[in-house]
Amino acid sequence: MTTIHAKSALLDDGWAQNVRLTLADGKISEIAIGVAAEPQDDSRDVVLPALANVHSHAFQRAMAGLAETRGPADDSFWSWRTTMYRFALSMTPEHVEATAAQLYMEMLEAGYSRVGEFHYLHNDKDGALYGDIAEMAGRIGAASTETGINLTLLPVFYAHSGFGGQTPIDGQRRFIHSIDSYVRLMEACSRLVSSLPRAVLGIAPHSLRAATAEELREILPLAKSGPVHIHVSEQIKEVEDCIAFSGARPVEWLLGNMPVDDRWCLIHATHMTGEETRGMARSGATAGLCPITEANLGDGVFNASLFLSEGGRYGLGSDSNILISVSEELRVLEYSQRLTLRARNVIADPGGSTGRKLFEQARIGGNAALQCDTGLRIGGDADIVALDRSAAPYVEEDKVLDHWIFAGGIAVDAVWAGGCKQVEGGRHIKRTAITSRFRKAMADLQQQ
């Protein structure tokens, strides 16, 4: 049992002072307000619930910063994708595990306590299945165990290169599964997840271009009661190709043909009409927004203002993992809205804090998308972030969030995941060993 005393804590029903939290069995078992710290308490300044990272491709952390040289023509998402394919073809299971551990360590240091791993690097370098069909998923599980991050594993079904069941290209060979092999993969992943504390299993049809309608209907039952994640409407070309093939836009097609509900997370959903945006909000699906990656890849800007006004919810993801930062993801999300609408404090409620609204919406959407329950309340997950506001001791309550997100200075001090402290003084407790192994993996990859 662990007890944390905070001078200030963001509880589910608002800010409170001199709060004592008792953690037991991965949950918050007791909360006392207006009390002094006791000798055994872990005393902190400001504590918040940790966030869930709803969308990650762990292996791509190894290529962060390595795709920022312009090619001979205009660069785009599609030229970046070609570079990513080449990189993916070079990684061994050991490389993937070392990269995932480095990434998950960085996520914890940033204030995430759970990751939704949209896992599609399945096969051996030649495209053959490993003897253990879940070899790569096992490496993801091992990295989550080593770092202490909670895992929602989302094995990807990826069968085609384009709409209408087009034959996969050679660069996709490590991603590809048939229905039969995907069933076996899900069975193996179910066994894996059952061995990991607090882990959740869902499914992830990669996209409408990578899975046909018939395949989608066949694999959906494999999710059982777990989450369903899918890339959708990330790029204009994807929208145009979907219209050419089906006569409908991607989100329009999904809402009209699939049982989209509150278990679904539509990743990006960048290019939607107003009607699609309203329909998605009404469906209960979560928007999986990845603002840093969406900016890095030139995807476009999600219509957050309309979506939220219609009751929609979003979660926050780091996708390509070019940079891991809770505060910057939230800042880029708000600033993209400001640049598009030429307005300020777009996501905030009238009279309310922008930082508070950004953070709370990401928490609520993350819980829904990854089937977790973060929040400082009795029975909530013991996933907690302590902030250090020594650089700005004059800010209080919602201004702490505003300052953290928009002004800098305030930093993550400590993080608990499942009630276990994994970050102290802004550094993961296993940082030295994890980073050493990652650097060795990167040196090896650079020589290939």
Image (cartoon, rainbow, N blue to C red):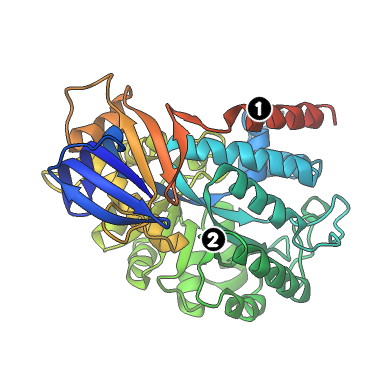
Q: Secondary structure at mark 2?
A: loop
Which residue is painted at 50% across and 43% down in the image?
294
Q: Amino acid at mark 2?
A: Ala
Q: Are marks 2 and 1 in contact (CB under 8 Å)?
A: no
Which residue is painted at 62% across and 75% down in the image?
216
Name above or below for residue 415 compared with residue 436: below
Q: Amino acid at mark 1?
A: Arg
Looking at this view, is 216 or 300 the one in front?
216
Please indicate whether residue 34 sits to the left or right of residue 372 in the image. Answer: left
Checking the image for residue 70, the label placed there is 1
Looking at this view, is 253 or 214 the one in front?
214
Badge 1 density bin: few <14, some 14–19, many ≥20, Cα 10 Å = few
**Can residue 110 be seen from the camera position used here?**
yes
Mark with earlier residue (2, 1): 1
Which residue is painted at 32% across and 66% down in the image?
278
> Where, by quadrant of the figure, is residue 163 drawn?
bottom right
Name above or below for residue 123 compared with residue 258: above
Mark 2 or 1: in front is 2
